Amino acid sequence: MNIKEASNQTGVYSAAIRYYEKELLIPAIDRSETGNREIDARIICRINFVKQMRAAGMTIENLRRYIELFDSKEDNDKEQIALLAEQLSDMEERRDDIQSAIDHLHYKLDHYYDHVVASEKELQELERKHDEQIAKTNDAEAKF
């Protein structure tokens, strides 16, 4: 299949597929006599793998390293597992940060009238005082 068909099948933009190839995230794609990419099931699987790992937040550098280990003829299971564990830890940390933000928003919604409104009034008052101070400073400077 050509790159457009591969893009439609995988949901990965053609430009991204070319980028994956350039960055050695997928193997070099065979070309037809006219120079068009001829993408087979093996490449589709690799594209989907890269797509999944990128969706999991893996950096290009770590993904490239993982693929090098995978493609190597040596036993690299421990290093591959370490990369995956590192990525899992990063994702769990991001999940925890997102959960904290969600919890904060729930709190604000649950306590809107007894907390948020009062906090916003306090902030507005601080802003008003700040504006007054700036105005006084500008007036004093204008007199000189």
Image: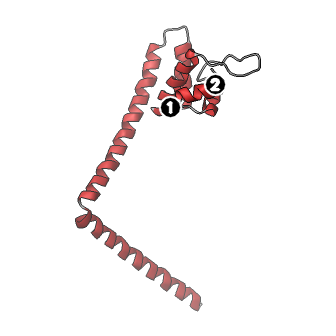
Left or right relative to 8: residue 85:
left
Up the image or down, 52 lies above or below 104; here it is: above
* Callout 2 crowding tier (Cα within 10 Å): few <14, some 14–19, many ≥20: some
Residue, x 29% and y 68% (percent of image)? 117
Mark 2 and mark 1 lie on one chain; the one further toward the N terminus is 2
**96 and 133: which is toward the camera:** 96
- Where residue 29 is drawn, which disc sits there? none
**43 and 57: which is toward the camera:** 43
Up the image or down, 85 lies above or below 33; here it is: below
| Secondary element type, mark 1 | helix
Which quadrant: the C terminus? bottom right
Left or right relative to 39: residue 31:
right
- Residue 112, position in %: x, y? 26, 63
**Residue linked to disc 2:** 21
The answer to whether residue 75 is visible is: yes
| Type of amino acid under label 1 | Arg
- Residue 122, position in %: x, y? 32, 72
The answer to whether residue 23 is visible is: no
Q: Residue furthest right?
A: 34
| Type of amino acid under label 2 | Glu
**Residue linked to disc 1:** 54
